[in-house]
Amino acid sequence: MKATEAKLLDFLKKSPQFVIPIYQRTYSWNEKECRQLWHDILRTGGNDTISSHFVGSIVYIEKGLSNLTSHEPMLVIDGQQRLTTVTLLIAALAKALSETEPVDGFSPRKLRNYYLLNPEEDGDRRYKLLLSQTDKASLVAIVSDSDQPKEPSLRVTGNFALFEMWIAGCKGELAAVCKGLAKLVVVDIALNRDQDNPQLIFESMNSTGRELSQADLIRNFILMVLKPQLQTQIYEQFWRPMEVDFGQEAYSVYFDSFMRHYLTVKTGEIPNVRDVYEAFKAYARSPVTAQAGVQALVKDIRSFARYFCAMGLGAETDADLKLAFHDLRELKVDVAYPFLLDLYHDYATGLLAKQDFLAAVRLIEAYVFRRAICAIPTNSLNKTFATFIKSLKKDRYLESIQAHLLGLPSYRRFPSDDEFQRDLQTRDLYNFPRRSYWLRRLENHGHKECVAVDEYTIEHILPQNENLSSAWKTALGPDWQRIQQTWLHTLGNLTLTGYNSEYSDRSFTEKRDMEGGFKESPLRLNAELGQVEQWNETAIQKRAKRLAGIAMEVWKTPSLSAETLVKYDPKVTTAAGYAINDHPNLLVGSMRELFEAFRKEVMALDPCVTVVLLIVIPIFLVNQL
C-alpha cells in the first residue's frame, strides 16, 4: 500500500480513469451529504486563511498492469461517493460558467477536459469516472450533455439538479466555489494487487462518508474475491436482477431486512440488526454452504429475494396471493417473513399447493390481527415465527400449520373466538394504528368488487363533540356522558362515509335521512343503519355484535377436529396424572391457603389462563446425580 496526500483536482487530472467495480454499491449520497460538501467548499473558498480542506481518502487498485504506453483504469475500493459527488459538482459548474473563467484554470473547457473527460479517447475510455449499471448511464449523459436513459439514476440526476440550483443561487459569484474546489485534499491510497487484501482494507476503511449497509458489505464480500470473469457472471446473472427487482429506492430501504430474514430462515437464529454482515460471513463459511460454492449461495439468495419482493414489495402476479400479501403489509407483519419465505419456497417448488399457501397466509394474518385486538404483547412473535417451520409436517402442510397455531400456549396463543369477539366490540378501534386496514377488510369481505376505502373518511355516528346537542342527549338519556366515553371509538359507533363534513354533529335521524345519508349509503358497513330508529347504547352494542360476527369470518380461527389435534399433542409422560395434592410437603399450613387464594384469583382473570404443573427437582438432588 502506498499513501500520499494530494489536491483532489490534481489527483483527478493526472489519473486516466476511475472505474467503480460491479461489486460496489450504487451511488447513495443524498441532499444531506451534498449540502455538507457544498457548505465546506464555500466556507473554504471564501476564506483565504484556510489553505486546504480534507475530504477523505480514495483507495484504488489498478485493474491490470500498466506501463509507459498503456494506463489501465483504477478500480475504486473506497471513495466512490466523494468522487461521484465532486464530478457532479464540476459538471454543473462547467455548464453554468458558459465561456467565463472566474478563477484561472476554471473555464468550462478546462473543467471538462481536465477532470471529466479524456478528450482524445473514444468509447468508455473517454470518461474520467465510470460508475456501475444505472448510475453509469446517467453520469455519462450528464458529462456528455446528452439525454438521460429511460430509467435514470435517481440519486445521480437528483444531486446534479441540486448543484445546478445552488450554483444558480450564487448569481454568477462563483469564485468561492472554484477556490474551494481547488483546496480540497484527499489521501491517495494505491493498493498493490499482490500484497494487499482489498476486502480487509475495504472493511477497515468504511468509517467515513455514508455508512455502508449490511447488504453492501455482503455483496462486496461475495464478489470482491472472485476472478473478474466469474465476478461479472455471478453479478449479472443473479445479483443485478435482485437490484432491479427491488428498484433503486427499495433496494436501499429493504434489502438489509431481507438478508436478515434470509439468514433467519437458513440458520434458525435471528441476527441482530447491526450484525447481519457478521452472521452472513459465518453462514457463508460454514462447511455445508462453503462446499456448495459461491454460485449456489448467490443463486439461493436470488430465489428468496424474488419471494420477498412478491410478498413485501407487491411484485406477486397471482391475484389472490397479491391481495393477501397486501393485507399483511398493511398489518406490518415483518416478523412473519422468515416463516413466509420458507412457505413461499415450498410453494414455488411445488411442495405446497397454492390454495393451502393462501390459507396459511390468511391464518397468519388472522393470528396477528386477533392478537393486536386482544392486546397481547408482540415481543415473542419474532421467535414464534423464526422456529415455526420446525414444527410442521410437510406431508400434512396446512393441517400442521393449523395444529401448531392452536397449540401455542399462553402469551403466544391464537386468541379464541370468544376472546376476539369480546375485545373487538369494546376496543378503541378509532386510535388503532392501522384502522384503514380493518375497515377495508370488513367492508370488502366476500366482495369481488372492492371498495376503495381510502376514498372515504371514518365517521363517528355518535359525534366526538363533548358538547352534544340536546337532540343527542335526549336520544342517549341521562347517562349520555358515560355512553359517549365508553362507546365513542368502538366498533359499533364507527363507519365510513363520503359525507363527513355534511354529517358534522347532526342528530342521528338527520344523518340517516339526509341526501347521501345512511339510508342511501352503498357501503356494507352502513347496512341496517337506515332502519335504526334511535341511536343509543343498545343500538351501538347491537351493531358491534353484528360486525363482530362478520369479523369472525374475515379473521377465522383454525378449524380442526379433536381427534386431529390429539395427533399433534406433545407426549408429556413425566407429568401425566400429577396434581398439587401429589406433593403434600410442597405447600403446608398457611402457604397452601395463600396458594389456593392466589390460584383462584389468577384463574378468574381470563378463560385463557390455564394451570400447568411442572416437576421441580431440588438442587441438592441435581448435585447428587
Image: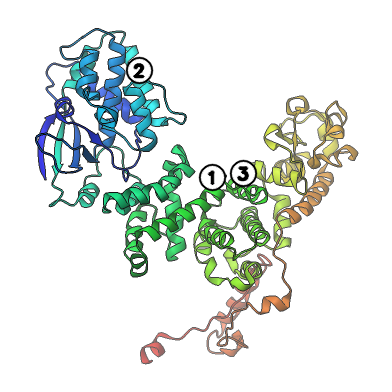
**Residue visible at 29% across and 20% down?**
91
Circle 2 Cα neighbour tier, 10 Å, few/some/many (<14 / 14–19 / ≥20)? some
Tell me the CA gap for discs 3 and 2.
41 Å
Q: Position of residue 109 (x, y in %)?
A: 23, 14
State the residue in front, 526 or 335.
335
State the residue in front, 475 or 223.
223
Tell me the CA gap for discs 2 and 1.
34 Å
Residue at image mark 2:
164
**Residue visible at 31% across and 8% down?**
171
Quadrant occupied by the C terminus: bottom left
Q: Counting residues from the N terminus, which is met first, the one under dot 3 or under dot 2?
A: 2
Circle 1 Cα neighbour tier, 10 Å, few/some/many (<14 / 14–19 / ≥20)? some
Snapshot quadrant of residue 460: top right
Asked which secondary structure carries label 1, the reply is loop
Q: How is the image coloured?
A: rainbow
Tell me which amino acid carries mark 1. Answer: Leu
Residue at image mark 1:
313
Residue at image mark 3:
434
